[in-house]
Image (tube, helix red, strand yellow):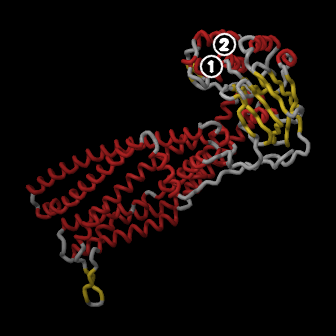
Amino acid sequence: MTAAAPHRNAPVVKTGVVHQVRELLRAVRASAVAKKLALLAGGIFAVIALTAYAQIRLNSWNQPFYDAISRRDLRDFVFQIGVFAVIAGVLLVLNVAQRWLGETLKLRLREALVTDLVGLWLQPRRAFWLAGSGPMGAHPDQRMHDDTLKLCDLSADLGIGLLQAALLFASFAGVLWVISKDFTIFIDGQDRAIPGFMLWAAIVYAVLGSLISYWVGRSLIARNAERYQREGELRFSLTRINEHLDGISLAGGEGDEKRRVASHLGEVLDATGRVVLGLTNLTWVTAGFGWVTLIAPTLVAAPLYFSGKVSFGGLMMAAAAFTQAQSSLRWFVDNFSLIADWRATLLRVAGLRQVLASDLEAGQQGSRIVYAEAEPGTFAIEALEVRAWSGHDRLDVAGVKLRAGERLLILGTPGTEKTLLFRAVAGLWPWGSGTVRRPAGETIHFMPRGTPYLPRGTLAEALCYAIEPAGHTKEAMLAALASVGLQRLAPLLERTGHWERELSIDEQLLFGFARVVLQSPPWLVMDEAFGAFDDDTLERLMEVLEGPLASTGIVHIGSAGEAHGRLFTQVVHLVKAPDAGEPPR
């Protein structure tokens, strides 16, 4: 019996900025460094508040200083220089403290986010499912490394800048209101009062600039997100070439790979060019407002001076206060390109976290294979049918049952997907029907096709993977290596290296069997494990499987050469199921 094929739909990601920020903040609050982050944030708030107070004092200093100049009062002039030195010294200390707190905040924020993302990504089978979840599963390494780094840096810088702007505006808004509370303008033959004229002028000026900046630069969000995606594809292409240099060189494929890289580079340059165009258009606004700002404070404060309501020193103090308030309100204009960059990285990081936190397996449609526990010492496959890309595959028997130490060989007929059957037995590919019963409380070691995974670290760590080396004695490790003919590796157990580069393909394949000998699991499931070995090596492996691993139950999928009749107690075949329906999507 066949069922509808599964549909591998990409998970739906919520793109609202409020929702995404809330989700990331929830992850940060649950992290091990949440208290440190709270203390750092509190320290930054205190430092910025003190800085705002010191800047108010510095602004008030302008009036007596410039009045002393206008009176040609040398004694008062020198005294005000001393006052300035004290205020500037305090501000210097506060600036250094703010820099240290800000950089430490970035560091701890990155620690919290990366730890959270890696923890979700490396949950059992989650990374495997993510790879098949659509565009969101492409280049998760870049999202967790580059994008998270950028997001933490931008979040800290923009957050500190926004807080500083808000406190400065709150501080200088009162100054502007007091200075211009009695401001009047002569209209229709009479004076009309405009209380707080300078404050309202600063607000209108900044709001106008913010609206124009948003209108001109809003496309930068999508353009930056596209650029980061293209950068990831280019990096992946270069990494893939570096990992397959031998195959490319032997096939003479350098020219073809050069064309592929050129294509990816062209896409990166096109995407970056669109970002450059957006930044150029935005610069018309930000630079234009920047130049006007040089004279705008004096122009706004000039009516107070010419009307005789303030002295020259008062004019300079009013202009300085307007500059501080207006620069605070212009925070959005000055930082819009960074905000667009922050929004783009937020989309990528928060989108990845949403997908990782979702039930990736439940989001896929189609009937499922049932995974159940069997009695200890028993492994069974019942009415198993696997939905493959080329249709449906099944075993040519209704069921098969193994006891401890028994060996099953599954031979695949042409056109069947043997690797998908291996993944189905392992639980990585649950689409299909039937039941896989695995022994309760007993370890099953899965050996996929090809070379085994060799983590970077000591050779002992690679041999014991994924168990701590302390769980095995050095003598046991040496015996495991010797059992498969890898005695030459004995002196290298404590050395750290890139073992997938330092060991030959044959040595890596044998290393996988040495790992099995060392860990001696009750059950071993293999995918085409014998095809790459010559007769002498295969004979050695037979001796290992009949000796140290004699009590290990084995399921082998694929051909077995001379081991066919010698090693296996049962033989079944993987065949195409009749009436196979639509393949998985």
**The quarter of the displayed image where residue 530 is located:** top right
Badge 2 or badge 1: first in the primary sequence:
1
Pick whichever, 542 or 571, lies toward us: 571
Separation of marks 2 and 1 at Cα, in angstroms: 9 Å
Cβ atoms at labels 2 and 1 below 8 Å apart: yes
Residue 378 percent location from the top left of the image: 75, 26
Q: In what quadrant of the picture does the N terminus appear?
A: top right
Residue 456 percent location from the top left of the image: 58, 25
Q: Residue at x 11, y 53 (%)?
A: 79
Q: Residue at x 30, y 47 (%)?
A: 95
- The numbered dot on residue 236 is none
Vertical position of residue 324 compared to residue 102: above or below: below
Residue 163 visible, this orientation: yes
Q: Is residue 104 left or right of residue 417?
A: left
Regarding mark 1 in the picture, which secondary structure is present there?
A: helix
The three-letter code of the residue at mark 2 reads Ala
Q: Is residue 575 left or right of residue 246?
A: right
- The numbered dot on residue 480 is 2
Pick whichever, 501 or 121, lies toward us: 121
Pick whichever, 137 or 225, lies toward us: 137
Vertical position of residue 556 compared to residue 234: above or below: above
Q: Is residue 350 left or right of residue 522?
A: left
Residue 135 percent location from the top left of the image: 66, 48
Q: Is residue 183 left or right of residue 29?
A: left
The three-letter code of the residue at mark 1 reads Leu
- The numbered dot on residue 463 is 1
The crowd level at tag 2 (other Cα within 10 Å; few <14, some 14-19, many 20+) is: many
Q: Residue at x 85, y 41 (%)?
A: 392
Residue 299 visible, this orientation: no
Q: Furthest-right residue in view?
A: 578
Vertical position of residue 481 compared to residue 430: above or below: above
Q: Furthest-front residue in view?
A: 375
